[in-house]
Amino acid sequence: MAAACDLLEAEIALDRIDAELAVELPPHMRAFAAAYAANTPVPAAPEVLRRGSTLRAIEMCRAHPVLADRVLAIARLAIPIAIEDDPRVIAARAAPSWDALATLTAARDTAARERFGTGLFPLVHRLFGVGGAPPGTRDMPWPAPVKGWHDPRPSPLDPETTWTELAARYGAEGRVDIVRGDRARTFVVEPGRHAIVVVPPLGSLASQFALLHELGHALVALLAPAGVPRVVDEAAASYIARGIEHASELAVHARRRRLQLAEALDAIERGATAARPTDQPPWALWHDPGAQAAYVEAEAIADRWCAEPGPLAAAIARERARVDHSTSL
């Protein structure tokens, strides 16, 4: 009887969190997208994702396998925020440098261990869906830029038309707003219903890739329920962005370079190498810990999808099921 009561209490807690997210998250994501596109300060995460009661609910629900999918979707949002909100992490997030990155990473790792019982990278890699073996201890090559990738050139792509074509091809129903900005990013306002895509000026092959990549994220937003693991989300974005490779061999070289960069940065994050290949740590290492391993694994997933093409929605669902089945909190 106690177990049944515990399960009921856990389910009620999740219902409350889901209800609050349904109210708070859409306006937050709209405001976040507007601020990002305008290069102004972004709003703080919704209060429900920052409360201790939400983290306690996640902990309580871990004991009930029947709730695993629901709690995992919430954990993927709340746990990284809890780490970044830790006062020691906030204090360490000063002017970026390699020495400061070591301090920041140590603060994040301490927060992860104290709050969630495991180190930073094992934790975020599980949340992202990373399951591959870590790299060995060695310096990874730092690839040279792809000549011509950023050179100015007219674009054959129109963002709105391209989205309409992709949505029709892959059966995505819902609303996608295209917003112009300097930096590309996709914001999921309501899974299955609404996304906002910030696209840069289309004046190079690199910017055309960025457009297709973000529209791939938008497809995931409309084709899948909330809580898609990052490796699956990034795999879909890579899969769609590879469409540019039919028109340019440079795009193939650029994809290979991105993979090499992700492998090198992943090795740095995991401590497999002490290399400092740039004057300052790349933006991703400072602001997006653990993502590089997700990018590496996502490319392998996209490779499989290219080798065995089929409906994208079904591929996303299968891959998510595989990742979620192997993920434990």
Image (tube, rainbow, N blue to C red):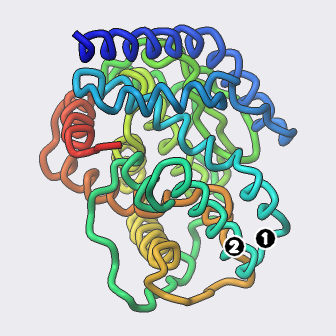
In the displayed image of the protein, which residue is found farthest to the front? 2
Q: Residue at x 43, y 16 (%)?
A: 192
Q: Residue at x 46, y 19 (%)?
A: 191
Pointer 2: what residue?
A: 101
Whether residue 85 is situated above or below residue 63 in the rendered picture: below
Classify mark 2: helix, strand or loop.
helix
Circles 1 and 2: CB atoms closer than 8 Å:
yes
Question: Splitting the image into 4 quarters, where does residue 66 fall?
Answer: top left
Side of 188 where 126 appears, left or right = left
The numbered mark at residue 143 is none
Amino acid carrying label 1: it is Pro
The answer to which of 245 and 71 lies nearer the viewer is 71
Amino acid carrying label 2: it is Leu
Classify mark 1: helix, strand or loop.
loop
- Look at the image and tell me whether residue 12 can be seen: yes
Pointer 1: what residue?
A: 96
Pointer 1 or 2: first along the chain: 1
